[in-house]
Amino acid sequence: MKINKDMTIGEVVRTYPESAQTLMSFGMGCIGCPSSQGETLEQAAMVHGLDLEDLLVALNK
C-alpha cells in the first residue's frame, strides 16, 4: 500500500490530490482544516468512527 495509517491527512491529500474525493466519501469533510495537517489517518478514522482498513483499501485503489 502506498498510503498507510501513519500518514497525516494533509500529507495524503498533498501527495495524492485525488484522495480528497475518497476521504470526503467517508465523511471526512475536514480535509482542509488545520488539524488535518497533524492528524494521522489512524487518528481520523478513530475520531470519525470509521474502519481504518476499509479506508486504507479505498485510498489505495
Image: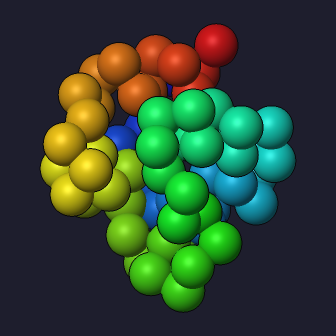
Q: How is the image coloured?
A: rainbow
Report whether 10 appears left or right of 27.
Answer: right
Q: Residue 58: x, y in percent?
A: 53, 19
Residue 42 in sight here: no
Residue 57 in sight here: yes
In the depicted structure, whether residue 49 falls above or below residue 56 = below
Q: Quadrant of the C terminus?
A: top right
What is the count of numbered marks?
0
Residue at the far bottom: name it.
Answer: 34
Is 11 in front, or is 49? Answer: 49
Report whether 25 appears left or right of 53.
Answer: right
Is 48 in front, or is 43? Answer: 48
Which residue sits at x=35%, y=19%? 54
Q: Quadrant of residue 47?
A: bottom left
Report whether 18 appears left or right of 49.
Answer: right
Q: Residue 43: x, y in percent?
A: 25, 58
Which residue sits at x=70%, y=54%? 13
In the depicted structure, whether residue 39 falls above or below residue 29 = below
Which residue sits at x=38%, y=69%? 39
Q: Residue 42: x, y in percent?
A: 27, 49
In the depicted structure, whether residue 60 falls above or below residue 2 = above
Report whether 18 appears left or right of 39.
Answer: right
Q: Quadrant of residue 21?
A: top right
Residue at the far right: name it.
Answer: 17
Is 43 in front, or is 11? Answer: 43
Which residue sits at x=60%, y=43%? 24
